[in-house]
Each structure stands twice: as structure tokens, then as C-alpha cells.
Image (cartoon, rainbow, N blue to C red):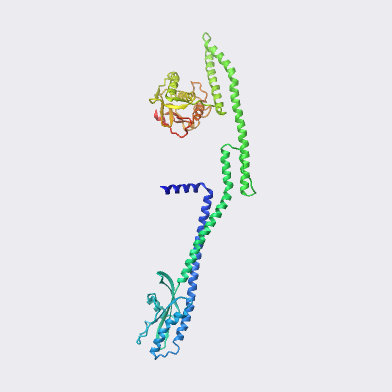
Amino acid sequence: MIFSRITKAALDQFRSSLQIRAVVYTVALSGTALIVLGGVLSVSIGNGLFSRKTEQAVIESNRAKFTVSRLFEGVSSQGSWRLEQVLDEVVQELESIGVSQTRQVAFLHSATQPNPKNLSSPTSAGIDLTLITPDFRKLVTSSVGLQTRTVQVIRGGESTPAVLIGQKFTLPGGHNYELYLVYDMYNEQQSLLFVQRTLVLGGFITLMIIGFFSYLVTRWLVRPVQEAADASEVLASGDLDRRLAVRGTDVAAVLATSFNHMADSLQEKITAMDELSKMQQRFVSDVSHELRTPLTTMKLAADYLYDNKEGLPEFSKRSIVNLHGQMDRFDLLLADLLEISRYDAEGVEPVFEVHDLNGIVGVCLAAIQPFADSKNVYLEADIPSGAVQCEVDSRRIERILNNLMTNAIEHGEGKPVVIRVAQNDKAVAVSVTDNGIGMNQQELVQVFDRFWRADPSRKRTTGGTGLGLAISLEDAQLHLGQLEVTAEPGKGACFRLTIPKRHDVTNFESPLPLSVHSA
């Protein structure tokens, strides 16, 4: 478990750090190159040592040939005792003159000739005669000159390569002999091992040096990119005055210059857009306030005409009724525009108090019931027993629920509307589900847009402004909550409001499902 966590942390650090990846790749590629180079050098040095050893062995074997010939000069073919005496001196003489290399000697009577005088076959002490195979002896006796073969000898308990050299001799009296010299390569093998250890140690030190310098170089190269990334984060957070220092005329300087130009252009455009947005907000706010006074006068006149419409001609009466309804809608539109302008200007100050969500839902149901009755819509409330306490601005929550219930009744096509309340440890939720016309995916994306309607040609009996859901979304976000919707064409829609029990909680899950089938 600990190892897996360490591995995961290392992988995360590797993925997130450009500098670490650059250093790892540089060290890995350099290490691969060093391994290949070290292998080539090791093989080349080993072959060189072997070739040199073989050449020296051949040279000394030629010298040994003359030494043996010199020993047997003047020996009579009839004096077997003198021949035996010289045979005993061969091994000692050849071992003593081979001072440049360690070698063992075997002077064997040829197996191809009878040995009636029972002449000896002297050998060096400790020589392994099994190295001299019958096949090699046959090759030596049937050839002219030196014959070489690579063999393995045991020295110090370890297998060591050696060179076996054989040649044939004819002694006085016609006696055929074979001279075998074994030159072990123990010293050369130790030299090769020393070279290999030196290459490994040197390669490791070289990799450490490469890693250190690649870290310094990549740090120098990555620093401008890191500074640009940090500056981008600062710009994204809203600090448009952040700029990069320009040093020199290289690619990093070009990057810093381009970044600064981009930041300047972005700051100019955002400043212009911010000014335009403020002008639009002031315009909406000023127009809304300026219209309030004449609207009040017009509404008073419309109310007076509406109250005294009896006795007027039928055409005038219908006109007065329409005028009264439109004046009410105009008044509601101005109120919504003022509320939207306050949200845009970030001038909304909520009043959080502890309330029972069941009580807020009950107030909304009581207020909306006459409208539901006029539409012949049955409101089904699924409210848990006991209090559902939460810190909210009750006026804004009531406005959200009134909007959701009104829309559900308006688009529910006379079918029942289900209102549910639930809570968990951190959050409370209210869902409003109808079985009406529903919406498609394109409409779901636009449902919270200002002045948007799913079907502009559809007759609205409530005189809506098209700002209700947009304001409801702002109210929900003001509580750090969520206002979500799902719908299916012909099956209905489900709106779900989820808010934390405390207004400072941000991590929570909704206790209610978001589904039109829950109705």
C-alpha cells in the first residue's frame, strides 16, 4: 500500500513537471548511449587482450620449438638413457624460459607410434591433460606447424580462458613426440574486469554529472515557460497588470514579449468590455428607475379605469382589461430588470437566517394554489415529517419556488405536479416535477438564458417576463447552491433546487434524484 502510494505520487510528479521529464529522458538516453559504448569498448578491449595474448603465445611457442631442438642436439639415437635424461629436462627448461607468460607444458609420446623403449611423457605439475583431446592430438600429428585452440582452465576456483598450442617433434632415433603449451589468460581477465568496473563506475559518475547539468540547463530553459504559466494563472484570476520580464533577444525573450503584447491586448479588450457592461447595467438600471414614475401614474390610471369599466361599451371594456393586464406585466418586468441589474452590478446582499424549508414550501403552495385551481392542476406535496432547517434568504427561496411551480403548472397541460422536499447531513433540496410538454436537449441548454422561451408562439396566461428562471439561477448561486433541470419531450420536466444547510458549505450532494420519472 505504501509502495503503491509512493509510486503514484512519483508518477504524478513526473507527469506534472516538464523539468523532471526532461532530466529523466536525458539521463535515460545518455545511460543507454553509455551502456552501448561501454559494451563496445569492453568487447573491443577483451578481443584486443585475447589477440595480443595469442600472438605472444605463438611467438613463445616458436621459441620453445628451437629450445627443444637445441636440447636434443648431439643426443645419440642409440643411447636411450641419455634420451630419457633429456626428456626429463624438457618441461623444466620450457617452464623456466617462459618468463613473460604463465604456461604449462606437456611433452607426450605420439599415440600413432609404438613405444618399445617405454619412453616417458613428461608434463608440468597440475596440468589438466583432459584439455588435450584426442581430436586435437590427431590434428597436431597430421599437420605441419603450430595448432592453436581456446580452452577453459580452472584457476583460483574460477574458470579462466586459455590458449592451447600444439606442435609435433621427431626425436633422435625416430621417436615421434607432441609438445603442448597451455597459456592461461588469468592476468588478462583480471585486467578486463578492472576495465569493466572502471567503465561502470565512470559511466555512473558520468550519468550523475549529466543529470546534474541537465537539471541546471532544463531549469534555465523551463523557467521562462513556468513564469509564463504562473503569469497566465494570475491573468486568469483577474489581475490584468501581470507582465513578464524580457531578458535578451532569444526565444524566451520573444515568448515574454509576445505574452506581454497578448496581455496588453487582453487588458484593453476586457477593460473596454467591462466599461460597456457597466454602461449597459447603468442604462438598464436608469431606464428602470426612470420608467418607474410614469409607470406608477399609468398604473393608477389603468387601475381606475379597470375599477370603473362597468357601463362602458364592450370594446372599451376589453381594451381596459387588456391594458390593466399589460400594466401589471410591465410592472413585473421592471422589477425583474432592476433585480437583474443588481446581480450584474454585484450589489445583492442576502439576509441569511435559519428557516424551516417545509414552512417556506407551504407558504409557496398556499400562494400558488389559486392559479393551480384555475388550471385544474393537482399539486402533490411530498414533505418529510419534522423540521428541515437551513440558513437561507427566505424571500429569494420563495421566489425560486414560485417560479418553478408557476412554470410547472403553465407547461404541465393540466396533469399533476409533484413537489418533493428532502435533506441529508449537509444539504436540503426541493424538486418540482410535471408531466407536461417537456423539453429537448437544445432547449435544456438555453432554459436559464434571459428572455428565452421554449415556445415563443405558445400563449402565456401568467404574463411572464422571461427573466424568472435566470433570476432563480442567480438566487440559487447566491446561496452557493445548484438549480438543475432535466426533461424529456412529451414526458415532462424536473427542476431541482439544492442548497447547503449552512451558507458557508461548498461540498455537498443533493438528497433528491433529478428525473422526470420520479413523478
Location of residue 384 by image quarter: top left
Residue most extreme to the top: 311
The quarter of the picture where the C terminus appears is top left
Left or right: 43, with 120 as reference point = right
Q: Return the x and y of residue 457 as percentages of the image width and height.
A: 50, 25
How many numbered tags mark residues here? 0
- Residue at point 43% right, 89% down? 75
Q: Return the x and y of residue 190 as percentages of the image width and height.
A: 46, 68
Location of residue 348 by image quarter: top right
Can residue 168 be seen by looking at this rendering?
Answer: no
Q: Return the x and y of residue 292 as percentages of the image width and height.
A: 58, 19
Q: Nearer the viewer, residue 222 or 275?
A: 222
Residue 269 to residue 17: above or below: above
Residue 323 to residue 404: above or below: above
Q: Nearer the viewer, residue 319 or 33?
A: 33
Can residue 104 be seen by looking at this rendering?
Answer: yes
Left or right: 499, with 347 as reference point = left
Q: Return the x and y of residue 234 as percentages of the image width and height.
A: 57, 39
- Residue at point 59% right, 27% down? 281
Q: Nearer the viewer, residue 131 or 380?
A: 131
Left or right: 160, with 260 as reference point = left
